[in-house]
Image (tube, helix red, strand yellow):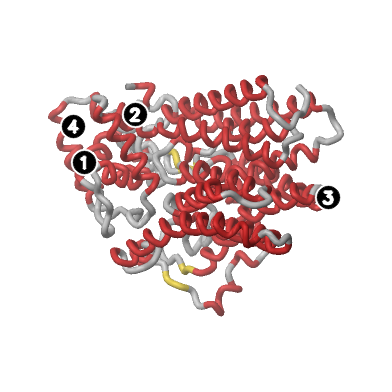
Amino acid sequence: MAATTHPDRSEIKLVVLISLLAALHVFVFTAAFPFFNSVDEPLHFDLVVRYSQGQVPRQLDPITPEALRYVALFSSLAYLATDAQYPGGKLPPPPWTQPVEKVIPQMLGRERDWGIYTNTETGQPPLYYSVAGAWWLTGSLAGMDGECLLYWLRFLNLLIVIGVAWLGWLAARKIFPENIFVRLAVPALVAFMPQTAFYSINSDIAMPLVFGGAFLLLLKFWEAEIPAVRPAAATGLLLGATFLTKLNSLPLLAAAAGFIAVKMFRLHRGGKLHSSLPALAAMSVCALLPMLAWMAWCHTIFGDLTGSAAKIHMLGWTNRPVTEWLHHPLFSLHGLWVFLGDTFATFWQGEFLWRRQPLALPVLDWFYKVLTLGLLALALVAVWKRRASEQRARLIFAFGCLAATLVFFALLSVKYDFQDCFYPSRAHPFFTSGRLYLGGLVPILILLASSLDFALQKISLKSKFILLAALLLFMLAGETAVDWRVFPCEFNWYHL
């Protein structure tokens, strides 16, 4: 297939196929994982239930009674328990396979145990939980119940990953209209990415969709000689939606603000800033109004602008004196390697535990660490050598999204003393959760795909796609090897 500026039907068909493969991949592994996983899934589920009932949290409450019933009945112990903890060296079977007289005391005990937990996520912005709550309510009205309704909620991720694959393709087209390898590699990496957040109820999964859309519209905003009002307003709405999805969107919004500021400078230098003011005003109003409205709500209800102060207090974190920041292990070669390496390993493989052990293979951790750091270093070289200034500016923006997020979580790592918290902790005082970088998934994958193309520039297009296919198959094989132990679990979709 020749590289063209405009996609032909065969390319569009390939993207449709890749999107369907993405949905199939997410379905197979989502169905394999039982409820509720070790990455705060019960807390996110509780918020979905609250929003489905029209309840906006006003404090750090315990899990609601309706959510508690699902958590008590359908929670698998396989994430945090070991076989050795139970008689006969085997975890208890699902409650619905046991006699009722035996199950009722167990369920009452589980409800008491879970009922003491406070939902520390209640201060998170509402967009994902509102949409997921509507999805949950739709399934409930359609007659679903029990574990089928729970999986219906998780299967919302199939639609999200399809959207992310398409946004990846569209954004790659905008930056590399002449390069079909990069255009197809980005959605293909989305489709086969073994990130376990795709298989869970959580707000991180929505971040690449909303900011991916904002990223695409910002690329269009950059190329416009005089920005139009409607596209600018749509861009602002998506930036506002990004903020309303998760608080860790702040570094991405900062990178976007820098990109917009550079565009304004270019407009000023070209004498077009005055003509662009209506579009810039529309973008600003549409972006800032939802942000300010939520911050005003948080300040009124939780006492701070982000709603995170109560959570930080409950977790026991305290501020480290600024004079001690430079003593943090991050400012050493080993600490920097731990921060970057663990971040990129979990960016690809996720953070689930299984039998109290990370659901990952050390060899795959090393593979993803070296691959990601190597490709990002090569991407810097590639950006430096690119002659097309417009293309370079867009790639620098993509780099800015990643760099801003890394700096943000590095700053949080050195800012707090984590006391007796499990994660982060004094023994591991780093934010290294790769799922928190998913908001920048589209720009990050564009960087990696373009770097891979740069590394393979001396071979044929056909050979590039063969190597890409080999990489994707390796990723899928590695994920299958890691997660195969999950499929026999009696609590999952395949055993309904």
Residue drawn at x 74%, y 42% is 451
Q: Is residue 434 visible?
A: no
Q: Which residue is mark 2?
A: 491
Q: Which residue is mark 3?
A: 385
Image label count: 4
Q: CA distance from mark 4 to mark 1?
A: 18 Å
Query: In screen coordinates, is 473 left or right of 212?
Result: right
Q: Nearer the viewer, residue 197 or 479?
A: 197
* Quadrant location of the N terminus in the rendered image: top right
Query: In screen coordinates, is 454 left or right of 402?
Result: right
Q: Amino acid at mark 2?
A: Phe
Q: CA distance from mark 3 to mark 2?
A: 53 Å
Q: Amino acid at mark 1?
A: Glu
- Are dots 1 and 2 in contact, CB under 8 Å? no
Can you tell which of label 3 and label 4 is closer to the viewer?
3
Going from the N terminus, do you reach mark 4 or mark 1 first?
1
Residue 414: mark: none
Residue drawn at x 63%, y 40% is 171
Q: CA distance from mark 3 to mark 4?
A: 66 Å
Q: CA distance from mark 1 to mark 2?
A: 20 Å
Q: Nearer the viewer, residue 454 or 350?
A: 454
Going from the N terminus, do you reach mark 1 or mark 2 first?
1
Q: Which residue is mark 4?
A: 103
Q: Which residue is mark 1?
A: 66
Q: Residue furthest front?
A: 275
Going from the N terminus, do you reach mark 3 or mark 4 first?
4
User: Which secondary structure lies at badge 3?
Assistant: helix
* Quadrant location of the C terminus in the rendered image: top left
Q: CA distance from mark 4 to mark 2?
A: 15 Å
User: Which secondary structure lies at badge 2?
Assistant: loop
